Image (cartoon, rainbow, N blue to C red):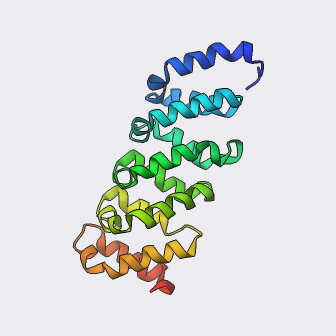
């Protein structure tokens, strides 16, 4: 963060590129990656984002790696949305699975809770437009339950309404799941205006 001359930091970035997978799997390695993305020039950042894109499945489901994606989604002020859009789209390709896995669900949950509105809006739109019929299945999962619960806090009233109406129209099916009664209770108390 202090030394900005590329000739003095290149060896660090070369080390990061060559050891990306091992760094992703370490608590302090993820911190190094977060800082390296923040301090990178455009070329270095692109290379790091490409490595993230290539290894997204591993990163999303890793107990430490997932924090890198959370960091990107929450701290978009130093990265352009267009630069991480390929990562968002690749995440969306496997959204239902990611909603039901512990660490990847945490990424999506945090995105809805504290993430950049452009990213969370893109993800919720994809989820509703392409996987609305999977919402009950996601809700039945202990990790997916929290993803959907946080998705109901988004600003987009249209998508929020679609999710709530779908859940409500499937409440009999939902009540047969582990978290069904809890989500019905949340919707009826916190979101009655949509019913």
* Foreground pick, 15 / 45: 45
Q: Where does residue 57 sit, x and y in percent of width and height?
A: 40, 39
The spot of residue 5 in percent (x, y) is: 77, 18
User: Which residue occupies the foreground of this view, 90 or 79?
Assistant: 90
**Quick one: quadrant of the N terminus?**
top right
Classify residue 163 as left or right of residue 39.
Answer: left
State the image coordinates of residue 173 (x, y, percent, origin top left): 24, 75
Does residue 90 sit above or below 151 in this rendering? above
Q: Residue shown at 30%/79% (left/top)?
A: 171
Residue drawn at (73%, 13%), measured in percent from left and top?
A: 7
| Looking at the image, residue 157 lies above or below residue 92 | below
Q: What is the count of numbered marks?
A: 0
Of 38 and 182, the residue lying toward us: 38
**Quadrant in the picture for residue 143:** bottom left
Q: Residue at x 46, y 27 (%)?
A: 26
33 up-or-down from 127: above or below: above
User: Quick check: 57 above or below 92?
Assistant: above
Q: Position of residue 52 (x, y in %)?
A: 51, 34
Q: Quadrant of the C terminus?
A: bottom left
Q: Please indicate whether residue 89 sits to the left or right of residue 178 in the image.
A: right
**Image quadrant in which you'd find residue 157:** bottom right
At 43% from the left and 73% from the top, the residue drawn is 163
């Amino acid at each position: 963060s202090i030394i900005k001359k590329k000739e003095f930091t290149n060896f660090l970035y070369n080390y990061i590129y060559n050891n990306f997978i091992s760094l992703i799997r370490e608590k302090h390695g993820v911190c190094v990656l977060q800082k390296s993305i923040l301090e990178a020039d455009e070329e270095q950042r692109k290379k790091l984002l490409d490595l993230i894109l290539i290894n997204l499945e591993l990163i999303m489901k890793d107990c430490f790696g997932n924090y890198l994606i959370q960091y990107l989604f929450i701290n978009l002020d130093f990265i352009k949305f267009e630069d991480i859009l390929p990562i968002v789209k690749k995440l969306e390709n496997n959204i239902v699975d990611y909603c039901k896995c512990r660490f990847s669900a945490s990424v999506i949950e945090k995105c809805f809770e504290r993430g950049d509105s452009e990213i969370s809006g893109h993800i919720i739109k994809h989820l509703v437009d392409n996987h609305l019929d999977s919402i009950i299945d996601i809700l039945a999962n202990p990790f997916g339950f929290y993803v959907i619960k946080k998705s109901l806090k988004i600003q987009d009233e249209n998508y929020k309404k679609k999710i709530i109406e779908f859940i409500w129209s499937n409440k009999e099916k939902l009540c047969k799941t582990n978290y069904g009664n809890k989500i019905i209770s949340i919707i009826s108390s916190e979101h009655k205006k949509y019913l």
